[in-house]
Amino acid sequence: MARRLPHHTFTDDALHLVLRVSEGILRAVRNLCVGALIEAVRDRTKTVDLKQINAVLMQPHWRHNTRDEAQQPAVFTNQKPKG
């Protein structure tokens, strides 16, 4: 018997993060979603959440370090900044 994904595979938070990080570049959306689906398989879950998106963003090719930024990977949440 084949296991099926739920109708809403990506949570709303995950979708918002994908859209924000991809900056409107369709290839980035596709690559991030495919990577997140692979992470969901590794986690043995049927729903992609912020955990899986952030796991993909931690990979070296998603890091956006410049000379002036700290050598830390960017980890995103949907929480509004304080202040």
Image (tube, rainbow, N blue to C red):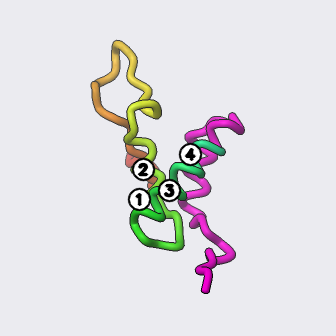
- Would residue 5 be counted in the magenta stretch? yes
| Residue ID for mark 2 | 54
Q: Residue furthest bottom?
A: 1
Q: Which comes sooner in the sequence, label 1 or label 3?
A: 3
Task: Please identify the quadrant where the C terminus is shown.
Answer: top left
Identify the mark at residue 32; answer none if there is no mark: 4
Q: What span is colored magenta in the figure? A: 1-29
Q: Position of residue 26 (x, y in %)?
A: 71, 38
Q: CA distance from mark 1 to mark 4?
A: 13 Å
Position of 69 relative to 47 (above/below) = above
Q: Position of residue 49 (x, y in %)?
A: 49, 63
Say which residue appears at 45% left-offset and 57% top-offset.
39
| Residue ID for mark 1 | 51
Q: Position of residue 32 (x, y in %)?
A: 56, 45
Identify the mark at residue 7; answer none if there is no mark: none
Task: Please identify the quadrant where the N terminus is shown.
Answer: bottom right
Q: CA distance from mark 3 to mark 4?
A: 10 Å
Q: Are marks 1 and 2 in contact (CB under 8 Å)?
A: yes
Label 1: which secondary element? helix
Task: Give the amino acid type for the residue marked by disc 3 in the picture.
Answer: Ile
Q: Residue furthest front?
A: 1
Identify the mark at residue 38; answer none if there is no mark: 3
Point out the frontmost of discs 1 and 4: 4
